Amino acid sequence: MIISADVRTYLLYKLKKLRKQFPQFSELIEGKTFINKGISGPQNFLSELLISIEENKLAKITPNLLSSNVHILNFGFYSKIWHYVPLKPKRQVLLRLDGIGIDSDNNYKKKDIEKNTLKLIERSSYLIYQSSFCKNCFKDIYGSLPSGEVIINGANKDLPISELSLNIQNNINTYFKKKYFVVAGRYNSRKRIQEVINEFNNFEIGNLIVLSNVPEKMKFKNRRILYLGMINPYIARYIISNSISLIHFDRYDWCPNIVVNAVFDGVPIICSNFGGTPEIAKKSSFLVDEFPKDLPHNLEGINFAKKVDFPSLLFKERIIDVWNIEPNKKPDKSYDIKYTSKKYINLAAMLMKLKSN
């Protein structure tokens, strides 16, 4: 079997393979170079998936759509040519869906995204949703959809740990001398990173590492808060794996890779009780019950979540719980990406079988 993906993701997959083969060049790859800029979550995950597919000898990988048996079309990162031309027969296309953009408050942008999403759905024969939350939201917006199923993203068990990663971690240990929390992600209102920083600045408990592009004017001069910016995903994961908890307080994330990796590594998650995050974190989560338990998984629920104030008291309770208890780390190996890649290949095999009938 031959699987294809978009050219840029294929190049990232090749680059990551080179990093494994030549670890002496890891600092070039992990430093502030091209791999550290402009890589989306969907692109990063799919490149890891391609590596797993190849390493487990499940299929061959190519950027050439014409020579592949099945193409994985990645919503959130794909060639815009798909909007105008079906580059491959739909019976040979798997569409991987997450919720990027469908919750936009910009009506013009939202309508444009919905139109383009419908185009991609029309050009695909089977849909893969990143979470049940994601699936429910898409069905609410688009109604009747082609066949599909939920496959939560997976984590690579072989986390590359370079000299650069070790040096950064040693500096963190020297700086804090004690345990620490991590909050990570792009700086925007939905992820509520600034609100988390505000809480740590306001109460005297816990150390916080911030892996986000926080504007300089929004940073506090507080020794318990360390700003490291948006760093390479491998280094970020290593820092998180050594923390006592990852704080992922997004109002309603779809399927955050950073949470999948943390749960796989056994790191407890502090998160809200709505969206895809609690679905992924499961027993690893310290839920903040800020939303009604019957809040629907659709646009109505999303719009409600957008308006809720930050639950300072509930959040503080969870921080104190984790800081004082320091829960044991229990890795969840069910998120091993080798299992995820087998699920993708089983679907690809199903499409090939349908094609031959």
Image (cartoon, rainbow, N blue to C red):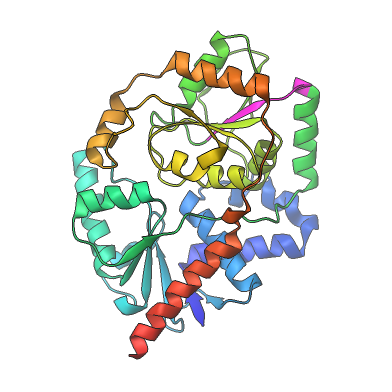
Q: Look at the picture and state if 183 lies above or below 3.
A: above
Residue drawn at (75%, 65%) of the image: 21
Q: Which one is nearer the viewer's eye here, 14 or 282? A: 282
* Magenta residue check for 213: no
**228 in relation to 317, above or below:** below
Asked which quadrant contains residue 163, the reply is top right
Q: Residue at x 72, y 25 (%)?
A: 179
Q: Can residue 105 be seen in this view?
A: no
In magenta stretch: residue 183: yes
User: Is there any visible trace of residue 259 in the rendered image?
Assistant: yes
In the rendered view, does 136 fall on the left or right side of 290? left
Query: In the image, residue 155 lies at what x, y percent?
Result: 59, 54
Please name the residue shown 75% across and 48% down the image.
161
217 and 266: which is toward the camera: 266
State how many labels appear: 0
Give the magenta range: 175-184
Image vertical order of residue 80 relative to residue 98, above or below: below
The extreme bottom residue here reads 357
Say whether residue 308 is left or right of residue 77: left
| Image x and y of residue 212, in percent | 54, 32
Give the quarter of the image for residue 121: bottom left
Q: Which residue is drawn at 55% across and 47% down?
A: 260
Counting from the top left corner in percent of width and height, residue 263 is at 59, 44
Viewer-side residue, 294 vs 73: 294
Q: Quadrant of the C terminus?
A: bottom left
Q: List x then y, in percent, for residue 250.
A: 43, 33
The answer to whether residue 54 is left or right of residue 8 is: right
